Amino acid sequence: GGVGGVSRNGAPVDDCRAEDDLRHSFLDGLRGSIARFDSSGRGVEVFLKPDMDAGRRAKPKKKKKMGGKDGKDASERSEDGPARLVYDHLHVGMRSNADATRLVEGLQGRRLDIRIAVPPSFLRAASLPPRRDVSAVVTTGALYLDHADVVLPRRNALTNRKTEERARGEPSKSECTSSTSSVVVPGLKVVTDHVSEEEERTMLAALAGPHAPWAPGQATRSGGVISRRVQHYGYVFDYETSDVLRRDAERGDADGEIGKHLCPPLPGIGPGIDAGSMSDGDVESWTGRAASDARGWEVAAGVIERTRRRDLSLVPDVDARSDPPDGPPTGGGGGEPRARMTHPHLNQLTVNEYTPGQGIGGHVDTRTAFGDGLLIITLGGGTVMEFREVVDSGGTGRRKLVHLPPRSLAVLSGDARYRFEHMIVSRMTDTVEGAIVPRRLRVSLTLRTALSRPTFDPDDDAPFSLRRSVRTQSPLGRVETCDFPPRWGQPPDGAAGVGADAAGRVSDLATPETERLHVHAVYDAIATQWHHTRGRRGVLWSGATSFLGGLEAGSVVADVGCGDGKYFAPILEGGCYVIGTDISEPLLRTAAASPGGGDDPGDGPQYGSLPPSRRPLAARPATAVADCLHLPLRSSSVDAAICIAVMHHLSTEGRRLRCLSELRRVVRRGGLVNVQAWALEQEGNERRRFHGTDVLVP
């Protein structure tokens, strides 16, 4: 809308001060009308964003008659009425996401009455008698609301200019996909229903479930960190260098992250099955059986093989006016031979998780890292992807909005791969063919062909992602496994050594044999005896119980390395809830003090002080077998975490740091973490003696 006024004789109100005062009164009234959604008590911020393209009020100039060069006078007076200040968006700044969500849910689609105090300056400018305490009620139309987290503007690495998107989500109605239906991006194809609903369900359980090997925080070239969760299979794409990390000994990891390129292998068809000898029908039958049996890892392997073989020459470009060429694929009658368009060398998979409101900035995947053909499978919720022609490459800056529905396959080849940057604007909704579609959790599977190491021209000063290799690059070999669950440092099928690269370096995420033999195997063997001599006797460390006693009732606590659950009782006694994880399944089985499944947790002294209402929680605790370096918990999902007598079982500094990083990841901002390990200084009557701080305790 706009802010303006008309005097009694119908003349426009041109007093800028009067309009400014009225605008501020309107904003004050709006703040008051939505203050009930602010839980912080610190107030609500409201900003008006002027429309920079139409209806913009010009600075006061000497008046001209109507019908100048541009058909308007200097005050932007139109034929329909007085001067107006036109605004494109109204931004409301809330103090938390929770408040923003409540405001959107409370006012979406409704009308809002805003009571404003009419300022005396406006009355004077409108030739009305000045009076005090004059108010008016402004009623809005049906509101359209959206919200997102605001961030600072950043520069585009491709063009070295500030991006137009100044926030992770523009709180405004999204542009409809139909607005760019006349634009055709050569090489951009979308295949609907590339995977079935059953395949989607089983793949999500395997690739985004509790066993998913989410990568550590991904640093970017600008010094930031990727906010979304990411997995890499086959080969790691390093966001910091915009390059693929090859599995060889040429790369030195000076920052101490040795083996960070040893991501899990791709899902492979097997064991003992040669995918190359299978027909297309065999692949589909094998994938269908795996989906029926809910074997998600094998379903992913079958879908990847299907994607490699799919002839995309039969699929027209999005919104293209002509059909793909006819004719047999390899020659013969019926017209000119049609060249098949397949991607048999796909060897790298990146899994991205987008929560509603998350997106990705505009980019062109590095030319020398990956070959032609980016194939994106959408699981869960759909989204709208935007394509912009890169002006620096000779383009005109054309834009295209494309809806990627659930279970679809998007293909970027040719111009779509190299001449257009693609992005997903961070917002909560999309507008698809006139309909507003709320976003849901989306998991994307991006399949690419990682290439061998490039050789650059030393005189090439183009941005790294646009540089070309002076020699032909070849696809890297496939790295696959049929073993589930996947893990970092996992060797491909047929490879020797666990987690070691060509130089013999081992990833911190690969469990050393020392820990397997002298920690894991020992606890598995003595689990029952350990529980009876330790847990049931209530042998607890005082520092841990003191920490737990200070937590707020209702807190969710992650007990990492919980063993037999001996700290469950003090957690539950304090009115909190616990999620326990441990690498030893036999120990976790003893954590359920009532193996028969009843509500009585048993008569052990550690449960004696529990009130009856909380005893069932001890009888059937929430536990999961998990490595402390890869917790099956979402980021910021718990209020506190404890890690008691675990750190000294980790044999390297890198593994200890990774454990601390995981604890920090799963605890919400402002939460608490308590870590305790055996001390170097032992009491005089203790038989243990440590001669240094870097000691593995078996």
Image (cartoon, rainbow, N blue to C red):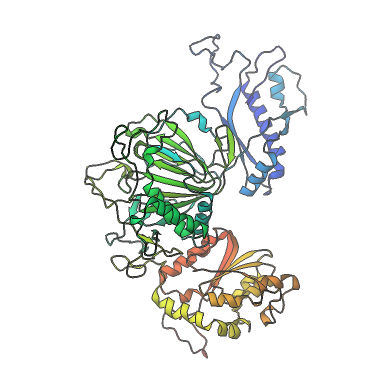
Q: Is residue 656 left or right of residue 253?
A: right
Residue 168 drawn at (x, y percent): 52, 43
Q: Residue at x 55, y 9 (%)?
A: 66
Relative horizontal placement of residue 238, taking residue 43 as reference (left or right): left
User: How many numbered callouts?
Assistant: 0
Question: Relative to 406, is 135 above or below?
Answer: above
Left or right of residue 245, residue 175 in this image: right
**For the view shown, which residue lies furthest in the front direction?**
333
The percent coordinates of residue 188 (x first, y second) are 40, 37
Question: Could you say which quadrant of the image residue 108 lies in?
Answer: top right
Work out which quarter of the rendered image holds the C terminus and state it. bottom left
Report the residue at 40% width, 39% height from top. 421
Front-lying residue, 537 or 664: 537
Q: Residue at x 60, y 85 (%)?
A: 532
Is 191 placed above or below 689 here?
above
Q: Is residue 569 visible?
A: yes
* Residue 525 percent across, percent down from the top left: 50, 82
What x and y, as percent, mark residue 442?
52, 48
User: Where is the N terminus found, in terms of image quarters?
Assistant: top right
Q: Which one is in front, 423 or 223?
A: 423
Kindly tell me whether residue 214 is visible in this rendering. Answer: no
In this view, the residue in front, 3 or 286, is 286
Which image quadrant for residue 657?
A: bottom left
